[in-house]
Amino acid sequence: MKAIQDSLEDISYLLRIPQRKPYGTMEGNVKKALKIVMDDKESILASIPADFKEKGSELYASLIDGQGGLRTLLDCIKDKDPDKVSVGLASSLDTVAQLELLQAPGLSFLLPQQYLKYPRLTGRGMVEFAVEKGDGSMFSPEAGGEPRKIATIQVVIDGYSAPLTAGNFAKLVVDGAYNGVKVSCTEQAILSKSSLGNNSGYSVPLEIKPSGQFEPLYRTTLSVQDGELPVLPLSVYGAVAMAHSDVSEEYSSPNQFFFYLYDKRSAGLGGLSFDEGQFSVFGYTTVGREVLPQIKTGDVIRSAKLIEGQDRLIMPEES
């Protein structure tokens, strides 16, 4: 599923190429993903628990031939309409995400005892932001629509790989901590306000799950130069991560998060961000990536809602 997802997500980069877009390359990416889906049907379905087999079979069929399927995405690419490709891609990635959710219900590892006092997310969730321009201007229209006063951004948060970070963030969202919060922007990031008063959250330790490892590391950065790569990379446009604590880089901020505006043109070793492996990444922007470059310092998060995953949010055990 990760190989399928990677192949499709590459199309997001190709769509951002100005002028003549490489539709032939996009078609190759989708055909590669479709071949994996067809060749590995047994292993994809075998990894779904018995209780979800029927739903899994429906999603598998939909991924091939459904409205959000890969063959539909191929038709969009053949039409050479970037808006249609963008919508079809989002739909295919959503179907992939739903299959992945069925494959991994709950955490596959035990958290260290000292971290059971933190909220945690035992799976995936989705947060929806409503963002408003601070100066009264409008966001550019969606395909075929009107300019928008408020834009919607959806973020998938991943408790499988960052249960403490995603759990703390989900709790803050449920508590309404980000409603009405202003953002500030740099060339590479959109940051939430650094202090939320009483909605302080938890000083969660830096949490990074290395690729190929069974569980996350805590209070430890990765050395990309030595080949250590995270399961949740920062080097993706629209990655969502926690800022560092003001006190120690071994901890994340209790509440300040950022959208990372990754740009391959200013990347370092192997096309990776210079900050790869240094922050607790816990999610990715799946809807509204085209909105991110329009956000400016002073714009406001009108609301943040946990629209999926509340049933997976585990609150701290009482001592």
Image (spheres, rainbow, N blue to C red):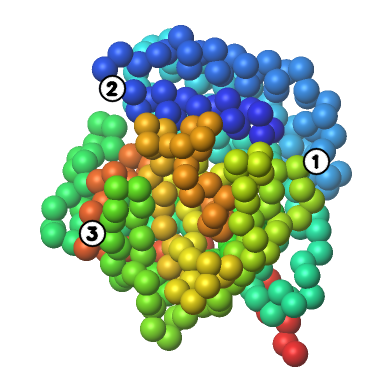
Res. 125 in view: no
Circles 3 and 1, Cβ within 8 Å, touching? The answer is no
Query: What type is the residue that disc 3 sits on?
Result: Thr
Image quadrant in which you'd find residue 308? bottom right
Q: Which label was assigned to residue 48?
A: 1
Give the alpha-carbon distance from disc 2 to disc 3, as whole Å: 26 Å
Q: Which label was assigned to residue 297?
A: 3
What residue is shown at x 28% (from left), y 22% (from top)? 18
Work out whether 72 lies above or below 302.
above
Query: What type is the residue that disc 2 sits on?
Result: Pro
Work out whether 288 lies above or below 279.
above
Q: Nearer the viewer, residue 315 or 149?
A: 315
Q: Which label was assigned to residue 129?
A: none
**Residue 13 appears left or right of 115:** left
**Residue 65 appears left or right of 275:** right
Across and down, in percent, residue 232 comes to 60, 47
Image quadrant in which you'd find residue 237? top left
Across and down, in percent, residue 273 comes to 47, 42
Circles 2 and 3, Cβ within 8 Å, touching? The answer is no
Query: What type is the residue that disc 1 sits on?
Result: Ile
Marks 2 and 1, the one that precedes in the sequence: 2
Marks 3 and 1, the one that precedes in the sequence: 1
Across and down, in percent, residue 71 comes to 56, 17
| Residue on which disc 2 sits | 18
